[in-house]
Amino acid sequence: MIWLAMLMLEETQAALTPATVINQSELLSPEDYVTRAAGLEKSGLTVVEVLVDQTGKPQTCGVASSSGSKDLDLKACAAAVLRGKYTPAADENKRPMYGILRLRVRWILTNVFDGPSGKPQSPPDIVFEVAKLPEARKSVQIALTYLVNEQGAIERCSVLQSSGFQAFDASACATMRKLYRFAPAKDKADKPWPVVRMQRVEFTTAQTPPRDAPEAP
């Protein structure tokens, strides 16, 4: 369990800007559902991470979480790289940077890319348990952007979408910088790059059951 330290944010700073996909609705169509997977009635959620360079061109794609079907996972990455059009990430001074964009593909015989912003349609990327939440909340969520160096360490963190509680926003950044380390982001030539990444962090109380847990009879 994480005990929340009530930290105060320092003066507001310009936020890092994550890479975004421009043509999300064009990435996949029902015809893309892999025939073999459809015949076996395969479904699930594929999470892919796309490395986007400073010009907005996708460099590489990896599967962060499998749907359980290799065919569907490969189709998701192929669509992201071959069809995706992206805006590059940027630092606090709006200078273009490499960025990693996480895309979720929900395969339900009609495939859908989950939206990268707004209210999450999928579970958060990271969940921390705390002793208590404000206003009797069951959970609070924060969208963070990081500057991750070539070794995978978080150098800077900014709040992209606030939880509405300053202490939780600050604690999310502080906790992730202390505890989390990413695999280095490498381009096609296997060169590591500093990148901007986005993650959705959720704080829950220990009494909150898992999202997928069945209801008590």
Image: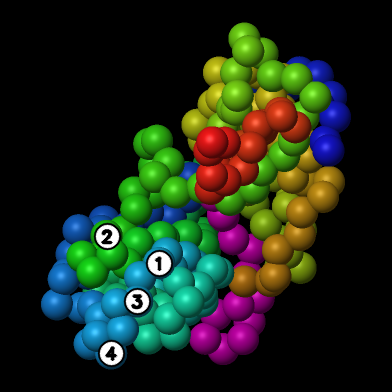
**Magenta residue check for 189:** yes
Kind of residue indicated by mark 4: Arg
Numbered label attached to residue 44: 1
Is 172 left, or right, of 202 in this rendering? right
The residue at 42%/64% (across/down) is: 45
CA–CA distance in space, label 4 to label 1? 15 Å
User: Is mark 1 in CB contact (under 8 Å) with mark 3?
Assistant: yes
CA–CA distance in space, label 1 to label 3? 7 Å
CA–CA distance in space, label 2 to label 1? 11 Å
- Magenta segment boundaries in residue numbering: 186-199
CA–CA distance in space, label 2 to label 4? 18 Å
Kind of residue indicated by mark 2: Val
Looking at the rendered image, the disc whose residue lies closer to the viewer, 2 or 4, is 4
Q: Residues within 10 Å of mark 4 (few under 14, many from 20)?
A: few
Numbered label attached to residue 79: none
Q: Residues within 10 Å of mark 3 (few under 14, many from 20)?
A: some
Kind of residue indicated by mark 3: Lys
Label 4: which residue?
36
**Picture quadrant of residue 130:** top right
